[in-house]
Amino acid sequence: MPVSLENSQLIYRSLKSCGIQLLSALPETWLVHLIQIAEDDPQMTLVRLAKEEEGVGLSAGAHFAGAKSAMLMQNHGFLASINGIVSFAHLYKIPLLMLISYRGTFGERDPWQTQGGNVTEPLLRALSIPYSFLDAPDSVEKRIRQAHTLAESSLQPVALLLARDLMWVE
Amino acid sequence: MMLRLDCLRAIYPDLEKCLVVTIMGALPAELQSLGHRPNFFYLQHAMGLASSTGLGLALSLPHQRVIVLDGDGSLLMNLGSLSTLARYKPKNLLHIVFDNESLLSVGGFPTATSTGTDLEAIARAAGIPKTCTVSTVEDFATVVHQAITHDGLQTIVAKVEAVGPKAFVTDLGLLENRFQFRRYIQSLTSKSS
């Protein structure tokens, strides 16, 4: 599978260095290595979800408990989580570190992913969710650390879009 | 049929040492009418996510008892949560569903449990190891007390009347509640460490 194992490991190490203890996830192609690495890590609580919006509740519960968490999802999972983001994370000022695989952009071959790609950034902006990109190995660790710092200081959701250039090896 | 308020009154002493997460609407208003406590968090929107929040708490604090006070309307919006709870089976989580067969807080529209959907059967089929349905206050108080004093994930469905208080807004601010709840948990964890 041409998903980059090396860059998945880099993302995972960066999450660990932020102290992430709980990871909620719903599998999609680009996230398979990340989820497998989390599964194999006895120090990580991996919660495999039925639907991504559950992850908002999971992260809120972890935050109340004093545990740091992150969410792994596809951008369609972000679309499916919006009510939870607005009516829980925004309403109650809950920090969320959302790692979102950015499908449906330049280079996308799967026709079914293409609509989600068009609306992901406009929706993030409409929701006033600060976001940046994970698109090159040399900036991954710093971006994750900065995103985590902002989520914790501002008590709000922050998004990192996982780009094709980082996740996919062609 | 029993009243949810009577059920809450019957288990109120049992809630003292637990982390309690509720859904929105009539339920938190009734619980607050009995007396707010800093270990109660009222999720006043995001219907369906009370159980997911309870799971996040229970997995992060395995030695702390967590109780989710859910409702039929909320649970029906996030039935997948039952499969996620069942997958991880936190021993310290008790999931109580008050089933009044109605979206009472928005005007009393009947939910699917009024036409035969059985939430206990769904919970059992999802893999929740212990489930039951109760319809008297005595039975409810007994099963909740047993569940709190024994380990194991359980879903208790309490069939209650579709009645609630006149008003749902209380003088407890949402953020006040949220920060107080987190401070309460911090005080517990700093005591235990």
Image: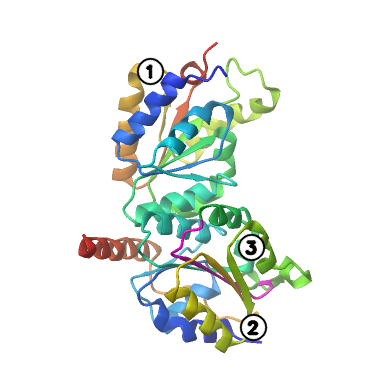
Q: Which residues are magenta?
A: B89-102
Vertical side of B163 occupied by B62: above or below: above
Whole-number angstrom distance, CA of label 2 to CA of label 1: 58 Å
Whole-number angstrom distance, CA of label 2 to CA of label 3: 17 Å
- Residue A79 appears at what percent x and percent y? 58, 40
- Dot in front, 1 or 3: 3
- Dot in front, 2 or 1: 2
Q: Which residue is mark 1?
A: A137
- Dot in front, 2 or 3: 3
- Residue at the (52%, 66%) spot, across then down: B23
Disc number for residue B123: 3
Which of the chains bears the disc numbered 3? B
Q: Earlier in the sequence, mark 2 or mark 3?
A: 3
Which of the chains bears the disc numbered 2? B
Q: Verify whether residue A116 appears in magenta.
A: no
Callout 3: 10 Å neighbours few (<14), some, many (20+)?
A: many
Q: Which residue is mark 2?
A: B135
Q: Verify whether residue B95 appears in magenta.
A: yes
- Residue at the (46%, 63%) spot, across then down: B91
Residue furthest toward the right?
B115
**Amino acid type, label 2:** Ser
